[in-house]
Image (cartoon, helix red, strand yellow):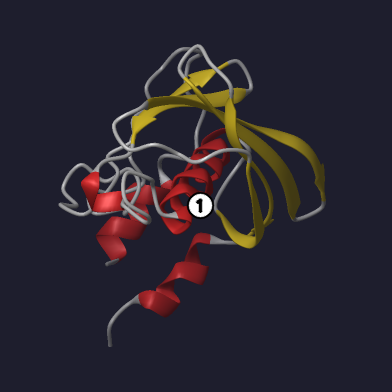
Amino acid sequence: MDELLASWNEKFRPHADGAQLPPHHSHCLACGPDNPHGHHIAVRRQGEEVHATHVFDERHVGAPGIAHGGAVATVFDDLFGFLLYFTGGPAVTRKLEVLYDSPVILGTTYDLAARVIRTEGRKLYMEADMKQLGGSPAASASALFLSVDVTHFDQGTPR
């Protein structure tokens, strides 16, 4: 676990505009390439925002043909986590609010974008939106993250 935390902490550094950002870790639920149940989102930096496209599939179903609201919230939460790569260090979700404008349809491509709105000490206020590719809004989210030291995550280390 120490090796994982050390490699994760190294990701909180400047990344070039347009760069694809590294996954948080290989088994992350939203961005981990090795998580068979995950979303496998690929995120890139665009100015001071992060952007991704995503297609929800049968692993993410809620109502028939529609993504589960928790799956949508997971993608937003992780997208916010990528903003931390250029805000100076790790942070944790304190509050996440998702507004659903329309059903998120399985098999449809969605564009997502997130940005930091303001910071106040350890507090990071963020906003994000998701819309159908070239189309109408599907959902939006706001979040409050609290900056922490990487040692905060030692609490999850098995003893």
Closer to us: 130 or 62: 62
Kind of element beneath mark 1: helix
Q: Residue furthest right?
A: 120
Q: Position of residue 154 (x, y in %)?
A: 42, 73
Q: Quadrant of the N terminus?
A: bottom left
* Residue 19 falls left or right of residue 101: left
Q: Position of residue 137 (x, y in %)?
A: 60, 27
Q: Which residue is mark 1?
A: 73
Looking at the image, residue 59 lies above or below residue 133: below
Identified at 50% across, 33% down, the residue is 13
Q: Amino acid at mark 1?
A: Ala
Closer to us: 85 or 144: 144
* Residue 85 falls left or right of residue 125: left
Identified at 46% across, 12% down, the residue is 18
Q: Position of residue 46 (x, y in %)?
A: 54, 16
Identified at 42% across, 39% down, the residue is 11
Q: Quadrant of the C terminus?
A: bottom left
Q: Mark 1 packing: few (<14 Cα in 10 Å), some, or many (20+)?
A: some
Asked whether residue 43 appears in the rendered view, the answer is no
